[in-house]
């Protein structure tokens, strides 16, 4: 990776206070980028900014943002352009997960996930697009393997990630000759707090992860892959061997993959489903 590729570029990152967003902010700052960081906790963003930049007032903008609110996303873009004068890369990373059987699920949970995951991506991309077209920049959507093959117990999550992939794939085709780079980025299982914050059937937070986070790809490694994909202007990136295998098998042997996914996910502690 060319260390000067990101130098001076203005990068907007949503969900920047933790997980992949935080790791991406750390990496891009180390590579000389100017950052506009968005999350619901402004205090966490300011703490991060002070830690990763010797001159955060000059190089980093922290914007309290709830991506499910359209006006917050418009404000994020407006303030970024006001401070830096341009946008080169938009990383739509903010996201929320869930774990429950659909039959037990309060429908408000799916609405919440669509508002954050899908509409958050749409809102931020809509308002950043004119500036990305000017800079011939990049828009990234952080999805999941669940955006290629549905995961049992994650109907709302998979639906939102499929929707993001469809939105971004279409956006890429619309701007095929405008110089806009669109990347669908699917990390697979990553060590982060996304499972702790995942919603249960009634909308309450899970509060713990059902998986061994120590065996997962780190958020820092995911951020490095994202940077490489941006530099090469890749249209799609699927990480981890199991992620790549799942997508391949889903396309070739869909019914077998359904059974394998069911068995794999049913082994989670306190799984909401099991084979009768």
Image (tube, grey):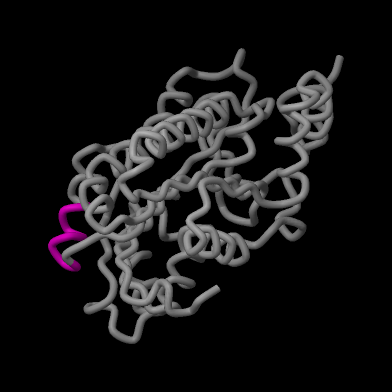
Q: Quadrant of the N terminus?
A: bottom right
Location of residue 77 with respect to 33 vertically, above or below: above
**Residue 171 occupies which quadrant of the picture?**
top left
Name the residue: 34% across, 86% down. 54
Which residue is farthest front?
177
Q: Is residue 74 in the magenta section?
A: no
Q: Position of residue 88 (x, y in %)?
A: 31, 60
In depth, the one of 153 and 219 nearer the eye is: 219
Name the residue: 26% across, 50% down. 133
Q: Position of residue 136 (x, y in %)?
A: 31, 55
Q: Tell me if residue 19 can be seen.
A: no
Q: Is residue 2 left or right of residue 239?
A: left
Q: Is residue 43 left or right of residue 173?
A: left
Q: Tell me if residue 179 can be seen.
A: yes
In depth, the one of 213 and 233 nearer the eye is: 233
Name the residue: 77% across, 50% down. 241
Location of residue 194 with respect to 104 vertically, above or below: below
In depth, the one of 128 and 217 nearer the eye is: 128
Q: Is residue 83 in the magenta section?
A: yes
Location of residue 174 with respect to 235 vertically, above or below: above
Which residue is farthest left?
82
Number of numbered tags placed on the structure image: 0
Q: Which residues are magenta?
A: 76-84
Q: Position of residue 195 (x, y in %)?
A: 60, 45
Is the stretch drawn in magenta largely helix, strand or loop?
helix
**Residue 173 occupies which quadrant of the picture?**
top left
Which residue is farthest bottom?
54
Name the residue: 41% across, 31% down. 170
Q: Quadrant of the C terminus?
A: top right
**Residue 262 occupies which quadrant of the picture?**
top right
């Amino acid at each position: 990776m060319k260390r000067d590729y990101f130098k001076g570029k203005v990068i907007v990152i949503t969900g920047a206070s933790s997980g992949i967003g935080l790791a991406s902010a750390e990496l891009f700052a180390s590579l000389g980028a100017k950052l506009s960081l968005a999350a619901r906790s402004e205090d966490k963003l300011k703490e991060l900014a002070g830690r990763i930049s010797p001159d955060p007032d000059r190089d980093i903008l922290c914007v309290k943002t709830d991506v499910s609110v359209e006006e917050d996303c418009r404000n994020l873009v407006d303030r970024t352009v006001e401070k830096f004068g341009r946008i080169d890369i938009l990383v739509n990373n903010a996201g929320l997960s869930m774990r429950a059987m659909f039959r037990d699920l309060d429908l408000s949970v799916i609405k919440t996930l669509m508002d954050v995951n899908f509409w958050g991506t749409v809102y931020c991309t809509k308002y950043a697009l004119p500036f990305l077209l000017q800079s011939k920049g990049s828009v990234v959507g952080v999805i999941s393997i669940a955006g290629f093959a549905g995961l049992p117990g994650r109907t709302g999550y998979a639906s939102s990630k499929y929707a993001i992939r469809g939105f971004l794939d279409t956006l890429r085709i619309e701007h095929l000759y405008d110089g806009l780079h669109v990347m669908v980025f699917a990390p697979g299982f990553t060590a982060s707090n996304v499972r702790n914050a995942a919603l249960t059937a009634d909308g309450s937070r899970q509060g713990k992860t059902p998986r061994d986070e120590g065996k997962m790809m780190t958020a820092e490694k995911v951020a490095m892959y994202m940077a490489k994909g941006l530099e090469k202007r890749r249209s799609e990136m699927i990480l981890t061997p199991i992620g790549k295998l799942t997508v391949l098998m889903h396309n070739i042997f869909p019914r077998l993959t359904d059974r394998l996914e069911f068995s794999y996910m049913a082994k989670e502690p306190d799984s909401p489903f099991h084979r009768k």
